[in-house]
Amino acid sequence: MTKNIAVIRGDGIGPEIVREAIAVLDRVADRFGHTFAYTDVDMGGCAIDKYGEPLPASELQKCLDSDSVLLGAVGGNKWNSMPGHLRPEKGLLALRAGMGVYSNNRPAKIWPQLADASPLKKSIVDKGIDFIIVRELIGGIYFGEHKTEETDGQKTAIDVLTYSESEIERIGRIGFETARKRRKQLCSVEKSNVLDSSRLWKTVMHRLAEEYPDVTLTDMLVDNCAMQIVKDPSQFDVIVTENMFGDILSDEASMITGSIGMIPSSSLGQTSCGLYEPIHGSAPDIAGTDTANPIGTILAAAMMLRFSFDMAAEADCIEAAVSAVLDAGYRTADIMAEGCQKIGCSECGRLICEAIAK
Ligand code: NAD
């Protein structure tokens, strides 16, 4: 099979981790007889430097013309003082909106080899952590109007939170469908005791539930959910929530599984062309030191094979290779533990490639 992959290396550690993910994809292509062609796309700080904007239309078009997009990370201190519309993160929001990817799916799963890296008590971890957060990605407060007004010398900042029934319904369906393929438990998270948008969210979820009688739907307020994720994460199978709540809860969920360097995510819309990336940022503090953990990006590439290219065996092969490298005791600095051997980003990629070739 031939697939065209748009590659956004981005800023900070982005180019280092993407390089390793591409090496892994090439190894998979060799082993399974595929051809992966890569088109480089500039986005984020590097695009601001080159074109004066974080995602020029021509770069977005390259992504739309591809079979899927692999992204490292964007952003860094250099661009922090730029005006809002010229921040690297704006490129990310424009990419998601341009691709129409409205659903972000993030697994929170503990690798048994890294159970000690979880900050939670062993008694909690031992009950198992294996859930997915399905987050609405292109609506809500991040996409509403933002403005700051000044009256009588006093500034007031306004951010608008809007959700329509159809926006809620399409993400709700992804939540139900995802739960259907797993343990059939869907937890809808909102703040319906305070927000109108959450009350509509809850109404739509319960209306949808009638179409999915095999899935058990529960409701949880977002503040309670934040507590339950650390108190008893084993209770969750699939969580579905709106954009900002999902942003915060998915970062919390990533921490309880160990390092954010290990976690991939996928963003999908109506087509099979998805956006695949690690959940972390550009980590400017370690950029260029060959210490970044490339596994989140490598597992994002595996998700791309599984969900966009229908290559389940190839994805399994990458995940097994990651597991084998962890089993052999190799660890990047962020997941280093006593008795293990510390390796850098490029060595980690090389070992995973070696495990795939076997
Ligand atoms: P970050 O995720 O980049 O880093 C947080 C901490 O985790 C740092 O100590 C970093 O060294 C560490 N870390 C992150 N990824 C790692 C990896 N693969 N291996 C080892 N350690 C890793 O978050 P931040 O510091 O808040 O943000 C840095 C920049 O990234 C900012 O400009 C932010 O806007 C941007 N950002 C981009 C994305 C994205 O591109 N999707 C996401 C979040 C943040």
Image (spheres, helix red, strand yellow):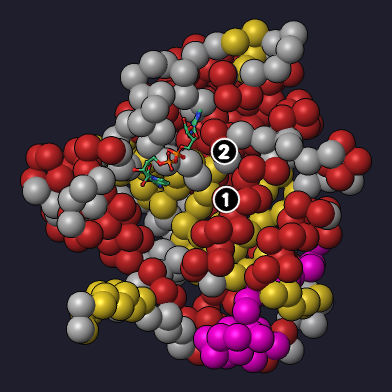
**Circle 1: element type:** helix
| Residue 277 relative to residue 159: left or right | right
Residue 287 percent coordinates (x, y): 36, 24
Q: Earlier in the sequence, mark 2 or mark 1?
A: 1
Residue 187 percent coordinates (x, y): 73, 71
Q: Residue furthest toward the left?
A: 51
* Residue 88 shows in this picture: yes
Locate the N terminus by quadrant.
top left
Residue 130 percent coordinates (x, y): 75, 49
Disc 2 designates what residue? 260
Q: Which three-letter amino acid code belongs to the residue tagged 2?
A: Ile
Question: Magenta span covers which residues?
Answer: 183-206
Q: Hey, which quadrant is residue 222 in on the image?
A: bottom right
Q: Which three-letter amino acid code belongs to the residue tagged 1?
A: Asp
Question: What residue lies at 74% left-to-right and 56% top-to-bottom?
Answer: 229
Q: Are marks 2 and 1 in contact (CB under 8 Å)?
A: yes
* Residue 204 shows in this picture: no
Residue 289 percent coordinates (x, y): 39, 16
The quarter of the image that holds ligand 1 is top left
Disc 1 designates what residue? 251
Against 348, residue 101 (above or below) is below
The residue lying toward the viewer, choosing from 153 and 346, is 153
Against 332, residue 121 (above or below) is below
Q: Is residue 147 magenta?
A: no
Question: What residue lies at 83% left-to-right and 59% top-to-bottom?
Answer: 235
Question: What residue lies at 14% left-to-right and 52% top-to-bottom?
Answer: 53
Q: Hey, which quadrant is residue 45 in on the image?
A: top left
